[in-house]
Image (cartoon, rainbow, N blue to C red):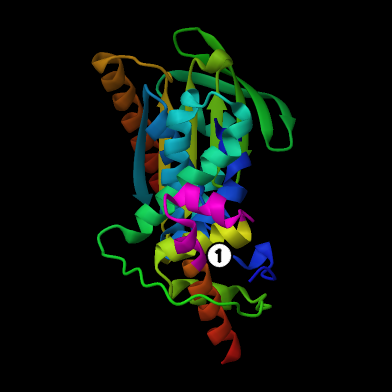
Amino acid sequence: MNALIRDLMPWISRICGSIALDRGDDAAQETLIVVLRNLPTLREPAALRAWVRRIAVRESVRVATRGRDVPVSDVSEGELPDVDLDDRMDVRETLGGLPPRHRAVLVLRYLEDLSEEQTAELLGVEPGTVKSRAHRAKHAFEERWRR
Amino acid sequence: MSAISPEAWPTATLDGVRRLQVLAAVLPGVHLEEREIDLPFERVWEFISDIERNVPRFDRDVASVRVTRREGNRLRIVTRLRRGLVVPFRVEMESGFMLMQAPARSYVVGSAASALNAGRTRYAHLEGVPRQLGRIGNARTARHVVADIEGIARLLAGE
């Protein structure tokens, strides 16, 4: 069990850290508890990664939004140029300006490299919602990058 | 966006105390106790990691501990209980976290420490038979863990 924690943690840590930010440690801990408690119910070992990802995203959003309302305001869609960022603080600060559910979209689309459809299915929203949230997040990153 | 390197994304961490909290939450039959100790992390961990010398001093059931093999952070030890039983353990030890498991996971012992502000340390201690034990067994395990952690705190305060 400790070995599984060690194997999963490097991967979970980015998902939880990027969605729950300052509460990322709590989210990672909650994720591991849910994963280890429910591991016997996982019928297909090959599905482990997708299953753990789903739990990590759900727990991170839950921990990050615990006790407060999260405004979800989408913006109009359209193409924006890619933003080349490699500064960790910029990424963290920019993510901090977004609601947790939008951060979840970013993590799934750009860190986990899921498609809009896969992201929408995992989050239980329409693909159009994923598209607009990703667009808003890209816009936020671009604004910070221009400063 | 896609140009953000994976290293630039914020990360979460799970220190040894949190790792023990996870194990305590998912393993039935184990008990976890935590204390704040008014000593720096390095001092606490030096004491905890010297298992041959110190486990028999704070665990009332253990007469001796002998390290029989050491490969990196993995150890094999043999513990002799005061009532005569000899129990081998596999040990994983790293800075701030240690987990000892008897064969077939018949008993587990965990220790973890993390540094707090002002030279203080949070110490966590976990022990038990990781299966459903019932109320009496759980209460016995809890009493044992409390006695161990109080013994550790007392010995550290006296050194």
Q: Which residues are magenta?
A: A112-131
**Quadrant the N terminus of chain B occupies:** bottom right
> Would you say residue A129 sits in the magenta stretch?
yes
User: Mark 1 packing: few (<14 Cα in 10 Å), some, or many (20+)?
Assistant: many
Is the residue A37 above or below the residue A120 in the image? Answer: above
Residue B102 rendering spot, x and y as whole percentages: 55, 18
Name the one closer to the observer, A71 or B118. A71
Whether residue A37 is visible, yes or no, is: yes
Residue B11 rendering spot, x and y as whole percentages: 55, 60
Residue B56 rendering spot, x and y as whole percentages: 49, 26
Whether residue B113 is visible, yes or no, is: no
Residue A108 rendering spot, x and y as whole percentages: 56, 56
Task: Identify the residue at image location x=39%, y=68%.
Answer: A99
Q: Residue furthest right?
A: B71
> Would you say residue A135 sits in the magenta stretch?
no
Identify the residue under disc 1. B10
Task: Identify the residue at image location x=46%, y=43%.
Answer: A55
Q: Chain of mark 1?
A: B
Task: Identify the residue at image location x=41%, y=72%.
Answer: A74
Name the one closer to the observer, A45 or B8. A45
Task: Identify the residue at image location x=33%, y=60%.
Answer: A65
Query: How many numbered marks have been drawn onto this rendered protein structure?
Result: 1
Is the residue A109 above or below the residue B29 in the image? Answer: below
In the picture provided, is B151 more to the left or to the right than A111? left
